[in-house]
Amino acid sequence: MTYENLIKKINSEKTGIAKGYDIGFLQDVCCYVSNGEKIFDNLVAKDLELFSSIEAALLKREKPQEGEFVEYADGMFARISVDHRNGTFQLSNKIGVYVSEGGHTQASGCTWDPDLDDIKRERLIFDNLKPTSKTMKGDCWMFSGGNPRGGRSVYHNIQFKVWLLG
């Protein structure tokens, strides 16, 4: 597959996941090999399946974790950015969320969001979070195929739980 054909495949892929890959990774794997289109299609299908499996595991978890959403005021949401491991947490909307098999998450980036300074830190205790039936789509990333190597990150949107801050 040529670079031009790769770009066409990326732009025509329906779920949007293809735009979440590092272009260099896709070039290395799919371009200028005899079965590049099949490799691309299989790669996308396997990663979508892995994201789906991770999403299902996340939604089964019963305790809040990094990357999940918190409704802290009527219609106002932020993501859990840090679990301090002492019963408290921080919120941010400026984080990256790594997800992996089994529904594990880890947030990175702006762990304390100055745009959320109006929330009293004393409220940010896990015991104050109540489960809801809501979910929200959120950005996250994983290693393509679950294989941790440089350049293999792939970004996508999946459903995360929403907790209500009491």
Image: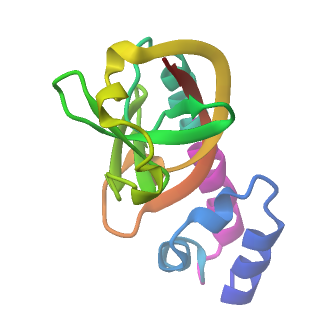
Q: Is residue 35 visible?
A: no
Q: Residue at x 40, y 50 (%)?
A: 117
Farthest left residue in view: 86
Q: Main secondary structure of the magenta part?
A: helix
The foreground one among 165 and 95 is 165
Q: Is residue 35 magenta?
A: yes
Residue range of the region highlighted in magenta in the rendering: 32-49
The foreground one among 85 and 151 is 85
Picture quadrant where residue 53 is located:
top right
- Residue 47 pos. (x, y %): 57, 47
Q: How many marks?
A: 0
Q: For this view, does 126 lie left or right of residue 73? A: left
- Against 116, residue 132 (above or below) is above
- Residue 127 pos. (x, y %): 34, 13
- Residue 32 pos. (x, y %): 60, 84
Picture quadrant where residue 41 is located:
bottom right
Q: Residue at x 72, y 58 (%)?
A: 16
- Against 165, residue 98 (above or below) is below
Q: Residue at x 66, y 87 (%)?
A: 3
Q: For this view, does 4 lie left or right of residue 158? A: right
